[in-house]
Amino acid sequence: MHIPDGFLSPQTYLPAAALALAAGAWAGRGLRERLDESALPRLATLTALAYGLGLVMLPLPGGTSGHVLGVAMLALLFGWRLAFLSHGLVLLLQALLFGAGGITAWPVNALAMGGAGAASALLSFGLLRRWNETLAVAVAAWVSVMVSAALVAAVLGLQPVIAHGPDGSPRFFPFGWSVVLPAVLLPHALIGLAEAALTVLVWRHLRRRHPEFAR
């Protein structure tokens, strides 16, 4: 669901950049203490997995693309801070090296996927874990995709409202919420199922090999 350059107005990406940089600075505090020699290789491996998964994109109507995120996997295993930093780096490298997403749109992409996606995964998992852990992991992954997609769609649909010419014609993204929300959310409801299955597989593997990562 990468948003490319040229789709967002400065009224959107400048405040988002300030918020993303502030969130990144907070998330990075105490990073050295939280990453020991055993956790770092696993974080690097799963970050690389998220990077690769995010490059397999399906173009969608409404100005975005569909792909598996991997952010729930990072959040459940390493917490929100490391998930936000890792996924933010994934999105930045994808934009710089492959043009997957824009540089000006990076703050919105990072906040929607690495921020809200990770937070919603952790919240969903926390609410459901006492009932069934596998179900909780699957739901957390699906919810992370849907929340991320909803925020991306909401920001895109806002552009004609806040950035238009004197005659009312949109200066950036031309479609409103009535077009963007269904165009983005419906495909991602299916993509979320793939995300859920993948996250459960990774979770079960690490639970067997490293129980401390599935507390």
Image (cartoon, rainbow, N blue to C red):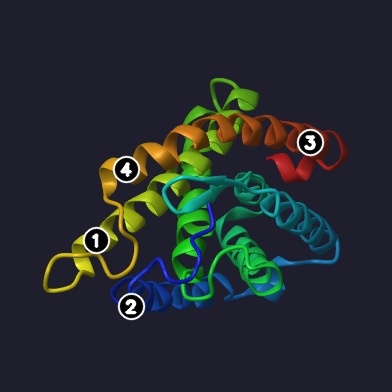
Callout 1 secondary element:
helix
- Mark nearest the camera among 2 and 1 is 1
Label 2 or label 1, whichever comes before in sequence order: 2
Q: Name the residue under label 3.
A: 207
- Mark nearest the camera among 1 and 3 is 1
Q: Mark 2 points at which residue?
A: 10
Measuring from the top left, give residue 185's x and y in whole percent: 43, 38
Alpha carbon separation for disc pair 4 and 1: 12 Å
Q: Mark 4 points at which residue?
A: 179
Dot 2, how many residues are within 10 Å of its Cα: few (below 14), some (14-19), or many (20+)? some
Asked if the residue at tag 3 contacts the one at tag 1, i.e. Cβ–Cβ closer than 8 Å, the answer is no
Along the line of sight, which residue is nearer the eye, 8 or 204?
A: 8
Alpha carbon separation for disc pair 2 and 4: 22 Å
- Name the side, left or right, on which 58 lies relative to 111: right
Q: Which amino acid does label 3 sit on?
A: Arg
Alpha carbon separation for disc pair 2 and 1: 13 Å
- Mark nearest the camera among 2 and 4 is 4
Label 2 or label 4, whichever comes before in sequence order: 2
Q: Name the residue under label 1.
A: 160
Label 4 or label 3, whichever comes before in sequence order: 4
